[in-house]
Image (spheres, grey):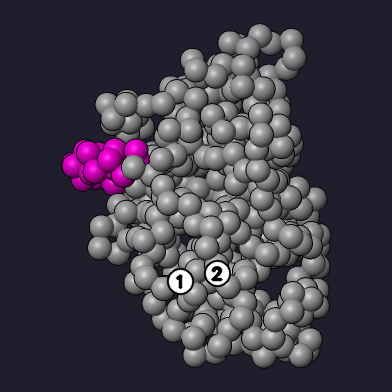
Amino acid sequence: MVFTVAQPRQMIIGGGARHDIGELIASLGVQRPLLVTDSFLNGNGSAGGLIDRMVGAGLQLALWPETVPDPTTDSLRSGVTAVAEHGADLVIGFGGGSPIDTAKAIALLAVQGGEMSDYRAPRRNDGVALPIVAIPTTAGSGSEATQFTIITDTASEEKMLCTGPAFLPAAAVIDFELTLSMPARLTADTGVDALTHAVEAYVSHRANGFSDGLALTAISAIGRHLRRVYADGADRDAREAMMLAATQAGIAFSNSSVALVHGMSRPIGAHFHVAHGLSNAMLFAAVTRFSIPAAESRYADCARALGCASAADGDAEAARMLVDELEALCRDLAVPTPESFGIAEEAWQRAIPVMVEQALASGSPNNNPRVPTPDDVASIYTAIFR
């Protein structure tokens, strides 16, 4: 099997790594970076610390702190303008998945123009874009190491998957200290997001020897540390382990793929404003149960890596244990159903046909070990509501 591996050229990893940002940016041969972040990180001083380091390194920096959760096509417009007005030669994404995804989209649009809908999957975007540096503040999306971005079309409310090397950061700064203040809900949601990335990368039709090793390592670390860091956000060892696992899972799925959970999750987020990791969690056990018959041994490997099954357990039993563990994990992390989240049943049922259409159109379900029919997808949406 021949496969291509893509990952950032440089990754600085460890507590305090953010302090090297000035030297890192300067080493890339640029002078005028645009720092893309949100109002919270700008307001609490986190962005200011990075700005001081970069100005101290002699860089001519501009700040654009206007990213929004679940970025939309409309939210990108002033960012593209900010790149042009500053004459930016590099874009830095600082924050969770939304600021980093925003930075990726802006970096491409500033060079190639058009609308993000022009670049949606199945198109593969190999063209030029401004270089990107990603600095994550959550341990979940893995966007700092992937060739993907997710942008919601303002008109259709569809979360568009956009793929290709144009979105791959040139460098990333992986500093777990930036996650120490994450609240428990965000810790849980991003942690399940990382676990979903790792499991889907491993069971995907596009899995390979490179992605497999990273996926299983990430699954193992998350199994040992997610509940622990949810219970105690100040646990530095657990925070560090989760941060590294999220990046490993990101590299794994970027070089394999995500699958049905993500395909079905994006429409939930777009239509009902559910955080991405949380909508993954709502689906995770049900989609795994549906998919196991087509990849029993692969799911069994995931169960053993997660720590809920042992080598003595046969594949069928281990795979069943994985579903049980995912259900238990979601209970322990207080993951709501769509109903308990506050979504009206009538609105949910009304949205199912378009969510099915959007899930399948993303292409992710085609990578699932068991490729679903539209009726299968509709049945899963119905089953998880309560």
Task: Give the crowd class for mark 1: few <14, some 14-19, many >=20 residues within 10 Å.
Answer: few
- In the image, residue 101 lies at what x, y percent? 51, 62
- In the image, residue 58 lies at what x, y percent? 76, 90
Pick whichever of labels 1 and 2 is earlier in the sequence: 1
Question: Which image quadrant is residue 75 in?
Answer: bottom left
Question: Which image quadrant is residue 24 in?
Answer: bottom right
Provide the residue designation for mark 1: 112
Instruction: Name above or below for residue 28 compared with residue 139.
Output: below
Residue in the image at 36% along x and 68% along y: 115
Depth order, front residue of 50/189: 50
Residue 138: tell me if it is visible: no
Instruction: Name above or below for residue 130 compared with residue 145.
Output: below
Magenta stretch bounds = 341-360
Residue in the image at 73% along x and 17% along y: 310
- What residue type is disc 2 on? Ala
Residue in the image at 22% along x and 39% along y: 353
Judged by its main secondary structure, the magenta piece is: helix
- What residue type is disc 1 on? Gln
Provide the residue designation for mark 2: 129
- Quadrant location of the N terminus? top right
